[in-house]
Image (cartoon, rainbow, N blue to C red):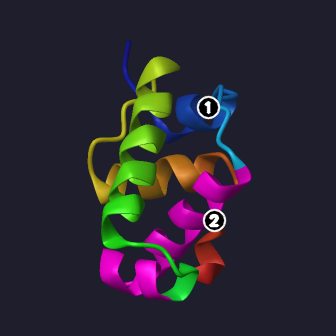
């Protein structure tokens, strides 16, 4: 089967069940330049940011939508309407 934009758009991806805090961390990280900036903005440690991102990646993997890189997480977040393209 050939993957096309139309095929991808026609699919209704099953999103992971992210907590409000995970969504907050994910959005902040995707819209920021570093984990340290996220930590500073959300008043948490850089390690906590990393832990949230690891759990988010695990949740995406659990639903068959791997996202091991920041770019792939961005794609998933756009697909799941966590961030909008015009915010970037």
How far from the left and from the top, in percent, is residue 49? 40, 63
Q: How many marks?
A: 2
Q: Secondary structure at mark 1?
A: loop
**Quarter of the image where one finds residue 12:** top right
Query: Going 31% across and 62% down the picture, which residue do you hit?
Result: 47
Residue 41 part of the magenta segment: no
Q: Is residue 33 above or below residue 76?
A: below
Residue 28 part of the magenta segment: yes
How far from the left and from the top, in percent, is residue 62? 47, 19
Q: Is residue 33 above or below residue 2?
A: below
Give the residue at mark 2: 24
Q: Is residue 8 above or below residue 79?
A: above
Which image quarter is the N terminus in?
top left
Give the residue at mark 1: 16
Check whether the beta carbons of the residues at disc 1 and disc 2 lie within 8 A of each other. no
Query: Going 65% across and 57% down the picture, which residue do you hit?
Result: 21
Q: Using the rendered image of the protein, determine whether residue 57 is visible from the camera's viewpoint.
A: yes
Tell me which segment is drawn in magenta.
Answer: 20-40
How far from the left and from the top, in percent, is residue 27? 57, 68
């Amino acid at each position: 089967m050939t993957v096309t934009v139309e095929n991808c758009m026609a699919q209704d991806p099953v999103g992971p069940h992210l907590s409000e805090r995970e969504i907050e961390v994910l959005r902040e990280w995707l819209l920021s330049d570093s984990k340290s900036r996220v930590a500073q903005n959300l008043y948490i440690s850089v390690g906590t940011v990393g832990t949230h991102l690891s759990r988010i990646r695990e949740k995406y993997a659990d639903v068959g939508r791997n996202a091991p890189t920041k770019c792939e997480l961005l794609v998933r977040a756009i697909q799941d309407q966590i961030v909008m393209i015009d915010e970037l």
